[in-house]
Image: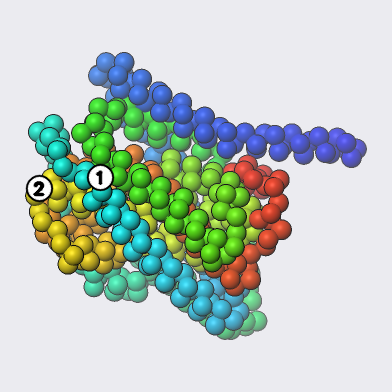
Amino acid sequence: MSKNEGASAQGGVKHAVMNLTKAILLALALGLICGVAIHYLMPAGGLRDGLVEGVFYVIGQGFIRLLQMLVVPLVFCSIVCGAASIADLRTLGSVGIKALVWYLLTTAVAICIALSIGNLINPGLGVDMSSMVSSDVSSITENASNTSIADVLLNIIPKNPIGAMANGDMLPVIFFALMVGIVISLLKSRVETVHRFFDQFNEIMMKMTSMVMYVAPFGVFCLLARTFANIGFEAFLPMVKYMGGVLIALAVQCFVVYMILMVVFARINPLAWLKKFWSVMVFAFTTASSNATIPLNIETLDRKIGVDRTISSFTIPLGATINMDGTAIMQGVAVVFTAQLFGVPMGPVEYATVIATATLASIGTAGVPSVGLITLSMVFNSVGLPLEGIGLIMGIDRILDMCRTAVNITGDAVASTVIAKQEGYLDLDVLNDKGSDDGIEDYAEAL
Ligand code: ASP
């Protein structure tokens, strides 16, 4: 092949993969339009059910399952490799402590923002309760009773690591993976084969992720179409103030707090960073799952922003498991909304309790759709709010779940970028390279 032919073939590949981000965005828009059209125009019955609960459900959930299939092996291998490659335990300790402190503090800030905005907007005042149909909260109350703070902390240590992996319990999996990685780095050449095995398995998982990304547009279309076919728009109306409060607080956290932190702690241009990262946010928005976004987040930080995998392979899965700023924001606004709706008085002690429990709830929230609603019951219980409040917001939660998940994973990525910069693991050449601004296409180029 001549040099020119080679270049044009490469251009062709680039062009083909260039379409992936656009295809996902297009699928998002088409899914929304199609879902709304079905909700309002298609008569209820067998055909509609077959389409929405048959075709859309199977393809959408199939896509989510493909992503979920990757999570445990990918997180395990990438943390083992990350920990093993930080030969110096002091660096690992400092990255770990920085990440933990950062995650806890940003979550506390997020709840304070949510409580303030909630009290400014007063989402629960003047709401006509009769127009809102309370959903069944029994599934939530069942889960609420067995989630205590002591359990959340104790469950970090797996009784059985294989059992934790089988159940997809991420925190114990991370704990065990970290220990394996640390021991590998201590034993060095004596366990070289095992080290290489994990490195190579990690490669396999990354490649598999790239392959799954190619069906993303179909999955995204079906997920969105089903959501809007089921919800339509009128369910949102009585909840407009509540939704507005959550969305404003999410925007403040994402576009003000994170960006200021990025400038102050890493001296990075936040707009340039966002331009490279936005496609990961879109992806998290469509899947509503932090876990499912882990592979794309690590890959984008590495290839577009220059965050070494040594850092991100540890901080991203950890963040996707314990750092849920967006979820904490929804919980803060939901507390104000429900307290106002049911006339429950809230004072400084109650608000302090909410900040503490919502921060812990964020640790206990798994990075999959809707779990934030379940841990919300823990927050409500702590200040004696009626769980019926959760039933009221359940109907419209999916759309907020999508938005808060985008903020959840952005928080993890900002922390990873700042820590990488401070520890000397950020490649500024990659960050400043304008040619790599779009996230998903280069990622899929690895195929
Ligand atoms: N869906 C969220 C996530 O994956 C968790 C939640 O708030 O329900 O980050």
> From the viewer's perspective, is residue 295 above or below residue 183?
above
In the rendered structure, the answer to whether residue 10 lies left or right of residue 423 reads right
Q: What's the residue type where badge 2 is placed?
A: Phe
Query: Mark 1 — residue?
Result: 121
**Where is residue 129 shown, x and y percent of the image?**
11, 37
Instruction: Give the camera-side residue of 422 and 204.
Output: 422
Q: Is residue 374 left or right of residue 31?
A: left
Considering every residue shown, the one lying at the far right of the view is 2
The answer to whether residue 222 shows anywhere in this view is: yes
Q: Quadrant of the C terminus?
A: top right
Q: Quadrant of the N terminus?
A: top right
The x, y position of residue 432, in whole percent, is 69, 54
Which residue shows up at 64% across the image and 59% down it? 306
Nearest the eye: 212 or 267 = 267
Q: Does mark 2's beta carbon lie closer than 8 Å to ligand 1?
A: no
Q: CA distance from mark 1 to mark 2?
A: 16 Å
Q: Which residue in the structure is indicated by mark 2?
A: 342
Assess disc 1: are there few (<14), some (14-19) or many (≥20) residues with their C-alpha within 10 Å of its C-alpha: some
Under mark 1, the amino acid is Ile
* Residue 12, image x, y percentages: 74, 34
Q: Nearer the viewer, residue 214 or 23?
A: 23
Q: Secondary structure at mark 2?
A: loop
Above or below, comparing residue 221 to residue 203 in the picture: above
**Residue at image coords 48%, 42%:** 282
